Image: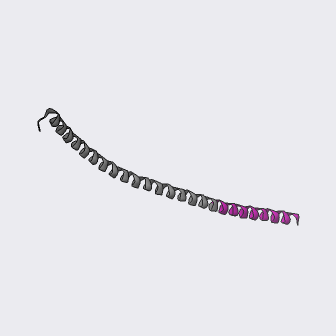
Amino acid sequence: MTIELGILVSVLGVIIAYQTYQLNRQKDVKSDTREDAKLQTKLDYISKGVEDIRIDLKANEKQMIALGERVTRVEESSKQAHKRIDKIERGDE
């Protein structure tokens, strides 16, 4: 009877250990899944931020091109104005 009781206790111990292992494994899987979801959300947020920065850079680039064109026109106009002023100063009108 004591041998049978010992075997029964051993079998129950193995069953409880296996159930505990399965339960902990499921918790680990759930925990990993949550962490992966959080990480994916953060990566999506960063990706959107990078895309917004790219859009802003393109807009700034267009503004710089337009500003460069305006500066070129102002320089040309200033050059012509200086030529006219030089003519007036020399009396070449």
Q: Nearer the viewer, residue 91 or 67?
A: 91
Left or right of 3 in this view: 41: left
| x then y, percent, for residue 4 | 84, 66
Q: Residue at x 62, y 61 (%)?
A: 29
Q: Position of residue 66 (x, y in %)?
A: 30, 50
Which residue corresponds to the image point at 23% horizontal and 41% vertical from the top-left? 78
Q: Is residue 93 left or right of residue 51?
A: left
In the image: residue 86, left or right of residue 14: left
48 part of magenta stretch: no
Query: Colour mode?
Result: one colour
**Residue 88, image x, y percentages:** 16, 37
Span of residues in magenta: 1-28
* In the foreground, 44 or 3: 44
Q: Residue furthest top?
A: 90
- Residue situated furthest left in the rendering: 92
In magenta segment, residue 16: yes
* Residue at (28% x, 44% y) in the render: 71
Question: Residue 80: x percent and y percent?
Answer: 19, 41
